[in-house]
C-alpha cells in the first residue's frame, strides 16, 4: 500500500516539510498536517472561507481574493514582454529593413518582365544567404516573401492566443486555474519559437 503524503504547515499556512506515512504524523502545537492527493492538498481546516490554500513547487501558499487579483494582473502583464521577446528574436530593430526587402521582392515577382535593375535587398540575399551558395534573384525574392508571410502569420497567432489566455487568466477563480492558463501560454510560446526557428 502506498504511504499517504502529508504537507506539514503552521497555522499561517507556511509549509515546513512533507512526510510519507501510513498514519497521521505526530504534530507539535500550532502545526497542521494536510493530506496530499496527487500533489493536490485536501484541507479539512481552511483559514477562512475566502482563502485559497495550494501547493506550488513544494511550498504551501495561502491566497485571498486581493492576492489572487494581484497574481492575475502580474500574469497578464507578463504576456506583453513575452511577445516583445519573440519580436526581438525574430526581427529585432530591423523592421524597416525587412519591410523594404519584402516590398522589393513582391515588386520583382509581380513584374511581367524581369527588371534590368534589381534591388540590392534581393541581390544581397541571393549572394549572402543561409545556404552559403549564390542563388538566383527569383529564389531570393521568394525566400524574403516566405519569411515575411511566416512572421505575419505568427503576429496574428500571438495576438489571438494572447487575448484567449489573458481572458482565461482574468476568469481564474483559484491559483490552480491561473497556473493552468499561464502554463498554456508558455507552451504556446515554446511551440511558436520552435516553428519560427528561434
Image (tube, rainbow, N blue to C red):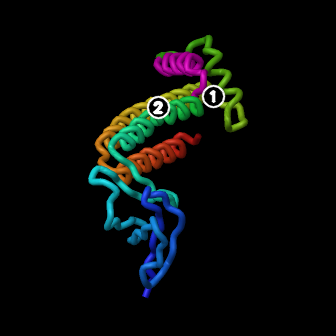
Image coords of residue 133 (percent x, y) = 71, 35
Magenta stretch in the rendered image: 91-110
Provide residue 23's location: percent of width, then percent of height.
43, 83
Residue 98 vs 198, above or below: the answer is above
Query: Distance between the Cα atoms at labels 2 and 1?
Result: 39 Å
- Crowding near the residue tagged with mark 2, few <14, some 14–19, many ≥20 C-alpha atoms within 10 Å: few
Quarter occupied by residue 68 = top left
What is the count of numbered marks? 2
Q: Around disc 1, counting alpha carbons within 10 Å, would you say few (fewer than 14), some (14 to 19), or many (20 or more)?
A: few
Residue at 43 percent of width and 44 percent of height: 185
- Side (left or right) of 165 relative to 154: left
Q: Secondary structure at mark 1?
A: loop
**Tag 1 residue:** 136
Q: Look at 39% across and 65% down and name the residue there.
A: 40
Quarter holding the N terminus is: bottom left
Q: Nearer the viewer, mark 2 or mark 1?
A: 2
Which residue is label 2 attached to? 80
* Vertical side of 191 occupied by 128: above or below: above
| Residue 133 seen anywhere in this rendered image of the structure | yes
Look at the image and say whether residue 108 sits in the magenta stretch. yes
The residue that appears at 57% across and 32% down in the rendered structure is 90
Secondary-structure class at tag 2: helix
Query: Residue placed farthest to the front in the image?
Result: 29
Q: Give the image quarter of residue 141.
A: top right
Q: Is residue 38 visible?
A: no
Front residue of this view, candidates 7 and 156: 7
Q: Which quarter of the rendered picture does the C terminus lie within?
A: top right
Residue in the picture at 40% in, 38% down: 70
As drawn, is 121 to the left or to the right of 69?
Answer: right
Amino acid at each position: 500500500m502506498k504511504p499517504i503524503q502529508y504537507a506539514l504547515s503552521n497555522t499561517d499556512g507556511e509549509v515546513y516539510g512533507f512526510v510519507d506515512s501510513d498514519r497521521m504524523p505526530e504534530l507539535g502545537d500550532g502545526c497542521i498536517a494536510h493530506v496530499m492527493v496527487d500533489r493536490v492538498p485536501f484541507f479539512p481546516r481552511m483559514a477562512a472561507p475566502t482563502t485559497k490554500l495550494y501547493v506550488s513547487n513544494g511550498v504551501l501558499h495561502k491566497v485571498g481574493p486581493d492576492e489572487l487579483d494581484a497574481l492575475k494582473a502580474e500574469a497578464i502583464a507578463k504576456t506583453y514582454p513575452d511577445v516583445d521577446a519573440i519580436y526581438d528574436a525574430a526581427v529585432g530593430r530591423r523592421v524597416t529593413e525587412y519591410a523594404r526587402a519584402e516590398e522589393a521582392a513582391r515588386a520583382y515577382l509581380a513584374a511581367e518582365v524581369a527588371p534590368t535593375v534589381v534591388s540590392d535587398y534581393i541581390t544581397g540575399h541571393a549572394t549572402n544567404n543561409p545556404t552559403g551558395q549564390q542563388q538566383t534573384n527569383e529564389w531570393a525574392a521568394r525566400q524574403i516573401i516566405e519569411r515575411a508571410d511566416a512572421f505575419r502569420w505568427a503576429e496574428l497567432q500571438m495576438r489571438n492566443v494572447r487575448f484567449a489566455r489573458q481572458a482565461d487568466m482574468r476568469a481564474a477563480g483559484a491559483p490552480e486555474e491561473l497556473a493552468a492558463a499561464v502554463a498554456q501560454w508558455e507552451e504556446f510560446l515554446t511551440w511558436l519559437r520552435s516553428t519560427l526557428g528561434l
